[in-house]
Structure formats: structure tokens, C-alpha cells
Image: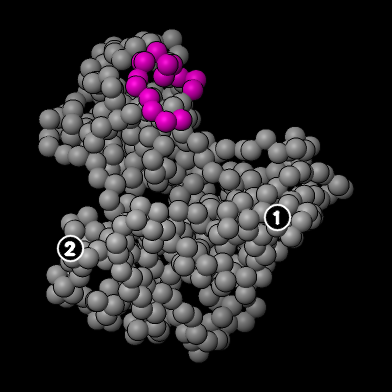
Amino acid sequence: MKYQVIVIGGGPAGYTAAESAGKAELSVLLIEKDKLGGVCLNEGCIPTKTLLYSAKVYEQTLHALKYAVNVKDVSFDLPKMILRKTRIIRRLVLGVKAKLLSTNHVTIVTGEAQIFDNHTVSCGNETYECDYLILCTGSKTFIPPLPGLDTVNYWTHREALESKELPESLVIVGGGVIGMEFASFFNSLGTQVTVIEMLDEILGGMDKEMAELLRTDYTKKGVVFLTSTKVTALEKIDENTIITYENAQGTGNIAASKLLMSVGRRPVTKGFGLENLNLETGERGRIIINKKMQTSVSNVYVCGDMTGFSLLAHTAIREAEVAINSILNIDDAMSYRAIPNVVYTNPEIAGVGQTEENLKDNNLPYKTIKLPLTFSGRFVAENDGINGMCKLLLDNNDKILGAHLYGNPASEIITLAGIAIEQQITSSTWRKTIFPHPTVSEIFREIL
């Protein structure tokens, strides 16, 4: 059967590409090997945020007295949290499927895709032809080959999201976004959490000052952080996993009832015939694409985690839109100037644009302005006794280069800074924007 567009992978990039192509009345085939919605919807972004919100409500209720609210016998039900998470995922997956099938007439096939060439793909016993091929195969969890790994029963994010029993103690190997979100969740529910990170600070790639604020606050909550620390061996003794590590202070070990491996993800590039396309690649085998998400083979596009650039759902969605616009000859290009990054801990961290570390590494001139979030009346009213921070980075012409927030609701207001950065707005122009009062977003006006 012949289609104008074949999309391989049904995650945020894939289903967005299929939906956009379907809206444009192109004939579309979407091939997904597992679950529609990909990692983000089924075992990543949405389920983690669902559980984190339950933990946040529980934690806020514990401290309700600060807001003159009396609550007795506060407790939680972890199995019901997991059930609620499952129901939400099911509803959203059905929504995506209905939107693709009913509204945009996308044909969905479940199974392993196999690429023969840039116009021919098979799945099962069927062979399909296309004018355009869009690759959105996503990423997978990377598990480092640690000595003793095969002797212990460790968690990845999948098992951590499904466990209906709360571990007494948890060691998380990897202090990135995923690791810190699980540290937040389990710490809120009472588990003793230890985070081991090889770098000198958690949340590598995000603003270091904001990461330090988060680490400091979570240390006060009881989380133990071992930074600049390398795991050297794992061992199972009785019901515990023994994690041996080394750092500047020497060697040591920790016993934990559960071990969560969270050292990162890698793009999926094998097992579906990618090599048959002979795409031009660069450093570390990364597929070379232009600003239209087009590869060296003109009718083949790559979007989402497979690019190896961002590994964020919102980046993938925008890349897919750009790819379809290219196919439709609509003028568009991908910009990575203002990709928001959010850590949904409690409090949240959000950043967009340049970090101080990036600017220093590239010897770019900049100036920093900072203001505590307590300058926002709304923040103080809703975060009694809690501190927060807003940081802006400006160039010599006062254009916004980067923005970084620590405190709730950072995830909801960071987009305002993203727009300013993408549109290359100066601080004086941004200050003329009228912000509603009282809102935490006013901090962007107060700081300028």
C-alpha cells in the first residue's frame, strides 16, 4: 500500500507529525512497536508528574497548619496513587488515538518497522511505500555496565512508576532530571533517599546556582547527596543491595532496600534498518539534519530523541511540526534558542536559553541580575516561609539571553521568558509588558 507519509514511532514527535500531516489531508501511516504516546505519555513525563502531584498534595497537607488549616491523621495510599496514574495514562492514550484516527484519518499499525530504503518500509507481513519517511524512534534507558549489576534486582523508571510498596531506603544512581524527580517523590512519602552523581553538581546542563539551591533544600529534607562520586560495584546481600563508590574522600558503601538506575537515555538507532538509508552522520554517529529536520536523503526526516539534541517532548513536538511544514513547502525552521527545561520537584526548577556556564565556556559577554521570588506578593502568600530565586542573563544590548527560576510555579511561567528570548526582546521592551497582579510572573517585571 502507498502512503504520502510514513512515520515510524508513535511518541510526541511521531503522533504530532502524523496528526499534522493528516490535518493537511496527506495520506499517513504511523507505525508504533509498543504503545501509542511513547515513553513520555506511558512511562515518562505524564506518569511521573501525576505521582509527583499526589506527593506534593500530601506534603502540603502535612504543613497545612502554616496556612491556618487544621488537618488530622494525614496519610497516603500508594497503590491508589499508582491506580490513578494508570487511569490518567489510559485516558490520554485513548485521546491521542481518537484524535489521530477519527479527526485526521491516520492509519495506525502496531509492530516492528523495518526499513528497506527511503521509500519502502515493512511491518509484519505487509510492505508499505511512501513519498516521505519520518523517523521518530525515541530513546531508551542507558544502563552502565557496572560490576555486579547482573547480581542485583535494580529499578529503572518503569519499575519505580509501578511499585505499590514504598521502599524503606532508595539509592538513585544519577542526579539528573529523572533521578531528582524520583528523589522528590520518594522523599515526600518518607523513604530515605541517597543520590549518587558523578558530576560536581546535580542536574548537569541546568543553571548551577539553581541546582545548588535545590540540593540544599532537599538536603534539609533528609536526602543525602554524593556528588563527584563514582559507583564502582554492586552486590546483593540478604534483602539489600550494597552500592560501593569512590570519590575524593576515598571509598565507601551504602546498603539500600532498592536501587534506581537513572544515568540517562540514548537515542534508538538500531533494529529497524536505519543503516539501509546511508544517512550522513557526524560526531558519535549523530545523524546530520538541517533546520527543516531533513537528513542528507531529502525525503527522510528525523525528529525527537533520535536527533540526540534535546530528548524533551516539547522539543520533539516542535521538530515534527517543522518537518511536516517542510513537506508542505511552508516556510519554517527549527530554532533551539529557547528550549525550556523543567524539573518538577517541589519546589520546581525551570530554565530557558543560555546558562552562565554556557556563556563562560564560550567566552560570551553577559551580565546577571537576580531577585528573590519573595519580591512577588503572590509567591509569599502561597509559599509561606519558602524562598525562591529568579535570574536573568542579558547581553551588552540588554537582550534576554537566559532565564532561570527556582520556586513554584516555575514550570508555568518560564514560557514568558522563552518568548522574550526567542523574539530577542530587550529588557526595556519586556518591562513595558503589563503583567496581571498579583502573580508570580510579575517577578520578570520586578527584576528589570
Label 1 close to label 2 by CB (< 8 Å) = no
In the rendered image, the quadrant that contains the N terminus is: top left
The answer to which quarter of the image holds residue 118 is top left
- What residue occupies the far bottom of the structure in this picture? 68
| Residue at screen point 73% across, 45% down | 232
Mark 1 → mark 2, Cα distance in angstroms: 44 Å
Q: How is the image coloured?
A: one colour
* Residue 276 magenta-highlighted: yes
Magenta span: chief secondary structure: loop
Secondary element under disc 2, as helix, strand or loop, is: loop
Label 2, on which residue? Answer: 425
Q: Amino acid at mark 2?
A: Ile
Does residue 158 appear in the picture of this structure? yes
State the extent of the magenta-drawn residues as a range. 270-284
Badge 1 or badge 2: first in the primary sequence: 1
Task: Report crowding for label 1: few under 14, some 14 to 19, many 20 or more residues within 10 A (C-alpha).
Answer: some
| Residue at screen point 52% across, 40% down | 265
In the rendered image, the quadrant that contains the C terminus is: bottom left
| Residue at screen point 64% across, 38% down | 144
Secondary element under disc 1, as helix, strand or loop, is: strand
Residue nearest the observer in this picture, 84 or 362: 362
Residue nearest the observer in this picture, 125 or 304: 304
| Residue at screen point 23% across, 17% down | 131
Label 1, on which residue? Answer: 247
- What residue occupies the far front of the structure in this picture? 363
Does residue 107 appear in the picture of this structure? no
* Residue 58 magenta-highlighted: no
Where is residue 62 shown, x and y percent of the image?
59, 77
Where is residue 188 shown, x and y percent of the image?
60, 67
